[in-house]
Each structure stands twice: as C-alpha cells, then as structure tokens.
Image (spheres, rainbow, N blue to C red):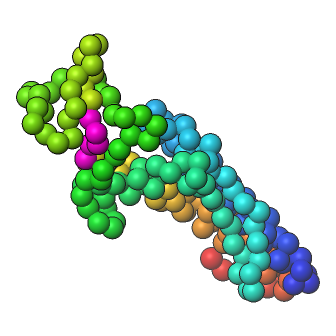
Amino acid sequence: MPINNIQADMIKAMTKATDILYQEMIQRLASPDYPNEIAEATKTLPVKVDGGRVIGTIEIDLNKAEMALAFELGSGIHAEKGPRGTYKIQPKDAQALAFRWNPQQEPWGSPKFIGKTPDGRYLFRWVDHPGIKARPYIQPSIEAKAQEITQLLGNFWVTSLSKQLGPEVEVIR
C-alpha cells in the first residue's frame, strides 16, 4: 500500500475519531446546565496533515460563546486556572444594571447601589461578579471516549500495516 493510501486512510480514521469526540461533547452540552450558544459555536474542522502529523480539530468560536471556557474551567473566584477574584460588570447600553433581588440587608451606602425601581428591582452602577463554578464538558468527553478512540486508531494501524506488509505478517496485540 503506497504512503498516500496510508495517509488517506489515516485522515479517514482521524475524521471518525474527531467526530466521536465532537458527538460526545454535543451530547453533554445538550444538558440544561449549559447555554445553547456553546454547542452552536462548536464544530469540527477538516482533518489536516502537517508534516508527519495528522491533526483533528474541534473548534469552539469564543466570539459566539465567550462563556465556553468559564464553563470548562470555572471563572472569577471559582477559576481553576489563572487569577481568581471577582470581576466588574458595568452596563453597556444603559445607565444602570437592574436585578430582581431579595437581600437580607439592602445595600444603601454602597457606591455601586443607585436605588430601587417602582417594581422592586435593585439598580447598580456596577456589580462585582463572583464568576461560576466549573462545569466541564471537554475533559469528561475526552475521558469518556479515550478508549474507543484509541481502539479505533490502533485498529487503523493494524489494518494499514497488514495491507502494507502483506498477509505473511502476524500482528500481535
């Protein structure tokens, strides 16, 4: 079997492996624990060959789902990587942020607090958001499908080598 045939078969195997992982991620993201934007921003790219490597890629467009990494790694005070702490949220297209809230003590005297609306919402100049706890979907998908993908790619090599070397070669697993 010529090298080009092995490479073409490897591209097919890697495409299938990438799709297996992608489907697992999408299944996990279908849970109500995740915003729909993450699944909508997730796609597989065509497998590419770079030197001697065959690369399968699953891309998450962070312009469409900027919260995707926060769900995988946590954010703010819950961040598992990078700096921890609250982060400031300010209004973009309004003078204030408005929340329905039932605090134990109203925040009068806070420089952030503006007041209350007639319908009971609390108005703020900004808030210090604590972030979110991690709800990983990438790493658990990898762990769930690692054995299946390893077996798929291993079978590819056994089949390719058998074709290349001929029937007189015995492959021992």
Q: Residue 52's quadrant in the figure?
A: bottom right
For the view shown, which residue lies furthest in the front direction? 95
User: Could you tell me which residue is drawn at 76 percent across and 72 percent down?
Assistant: 48
The location of residue 141, given as percent across then percent down, is: 51, 54
Quadrant location, the C terminus: bottom right
User: Against 72, is 107 above or below?
Assistant: above
Q: Which residues are magenta?
A: 124-128
Whether residue 170 is visible: no
Task: Decide whether the magenta segment is chiefly helix, strand or loop.
Answer: strand
Residue 154 is left or right of residue 10, and the answer is left
For the view shown, which residue lies furthest in the top direction? 119
User: Could you tell me which residue is drawn at 24 percent across and 26 percent down?
Assistant: 122
User: Could you tell me which residue is drawn at 13 percent across and 39 percent down?
Assistant: 110
User: Against 20, is 27 above or below?
Assistant: above
The location of residue 116, given as percent across then percent down, is: 22, 22
The location of residue 78, given as percent across then percent down, is: 27, 54
**How many numbered tags mark residues here?**
0
Determine if the magenta segment contains residue 55. Answer: no
- Viewer-side residue, 170 vs 148: 148
